[in-house]
Amino acid sequence: MNAEELLKQYTTGTRDFSGAQLQHVDLSQASIADIDLWQADLSHANLTQTNLTAASLRETQLTAANLSSANLQNADLREANFEQAILENTQFQNAIYDSTTHFPDSFEPAAAWKIEPESNLQSAVLAKADLSGVDLSHANLQDANLRSANLYGCDLDRANLTNACLVEADLSEANLSRSNLSGCNLESANLERADLRQANLFGVDLRSTRLTGANLQAALCNEATQFPAEISPAAVGAIVIAPGISLQGADLAQVSLVGADLRGANLTETNLRGSDLWGADLSDAALVRADLTGANLWGAQLTDADLTGAIVRDADLTGAELSGTNLADESIDRL
């Protein structure tokens, strides 16, 4: 296929050019936004000043292509090969790539987002992005814009999605176990068959969300969490976190309880290993023999809490209020 044929088909509405053989093609200054060039071969192509906004360049061969001043904003670059490509002044804002994307030596795409476990995607603009099946476990997606994104089957285990925009996003069959969804916008989102076990749903409005088959066992809610009228939090196994609650012996390891109001709660022998209790209010709480190994208690309120026999080894108590706290000698030794 040559440039004339591609542009003619593009003008008539064709967007799918996957697998096209376009070696040495001259598409300089062409505007071909939203084009699908999956597995296409554009090696040695002239793409100077080409508009490839939101293009799919997955597994695209771009070896030795000239992309000077090209616009690749919001493009999908996963598994693309840019070896020996000319990338002077190329725009990569909000493009996505991963460890399989091959760039020239020492090149890092400015303002692009790397999709991988534990990645920092805070405030990323990923609206309408196809992230189906990807591994974003432990990733930071706080304040990210994922409106209408395809997150089908995505692994978001323990991901931070605080205040993220997930309006009309497809999260069906996604793994959201132990993720932090507090304050996020899930209006009209699809969570069918999603795993939300021990997820933090503080302040989330689920009334317009599709939840058929979703696993909400031990999902963490508060008084501001809103469920559809036909769903009772207790009936689906969700836990409403509130002052005075009894969670004695519960397994809450590695969950997010950021800012939780647990005043006077019974947390005797509760497993809180590795949990995030940043800024939580645990005043007057019973934490007798609780396991807080590696827990984040930064800035937590522990006034008059009872930690007799609690394990607090490697816990972060920076800035925590401990006045009146009952810390037995053996607990102190484990700090």
Image (cartoon, rainbow, N blue to C red):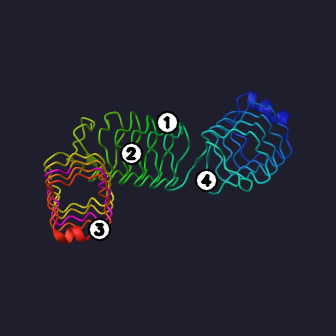
Mark 4 or 1: in front is 4
Direction from residue 49 to residue 99 in the image, left or right: left
| Disc 4/disc 3 C-alpha distance (Å) | 36 Å
**Where are the magenta residues, as a range?**
282-299
Image quadrant assignment for residue 267: bottom left
Q: Residue at x 66, y 41 (%)?
A: 92
Which of the two labelled residues, at mark 4 and mark 1, occupies the earlier sequence position?
A: 4
Disc with the residue nearer the chain's start (2 vs 1): 1
Question: Pointer 1: what residue?
Answer: 148
Mark toward the start of the polypeptide (4 vs 3): 4
Alpha-carbon span between mark 3 and mark 1: 43 Å
- In the rendered view, does 136 fall on the left or right side of 27? left
- What amino acid type should be assigned to the residue bearing mark 1? Ser
Indicate which label's residue lies in the foreground, 2 or 4: 4
Name the residue tied to disc 3: 313
Residue position marked by numbered label 4 in the rendering: 98
Quick one: SS at disc 1? loop
Residue 177: percent from left, percent from top = 36, 54
For the stretch drawn in magenta, the main secondary structure is: loop
Say what amino acid the circle numbered 2 marks. Glu
Tag 2's secondary structure?
loop
Q: For the residue labelled by badge 4, is the local secondary structure a helix, a strand or a loop?
A: loop
Q: Position of residue 185 (x, y in %)?
A: 39, 35
- Asked if the magenta segment contains residue 289, the reply would be yes
Depth check, mark 3 against mark 2: the one in front is 3
Classify mark 2: residues with Cα within 10 Å, few (<14), some (14-19) or many (20+): some
Q: CA distance from mark 3 to mark 2?
A: 39 Å
Q: Amino acid at mark 3?
A: Arg
Between circles 3 and 1, the one closer to the viewer is 3
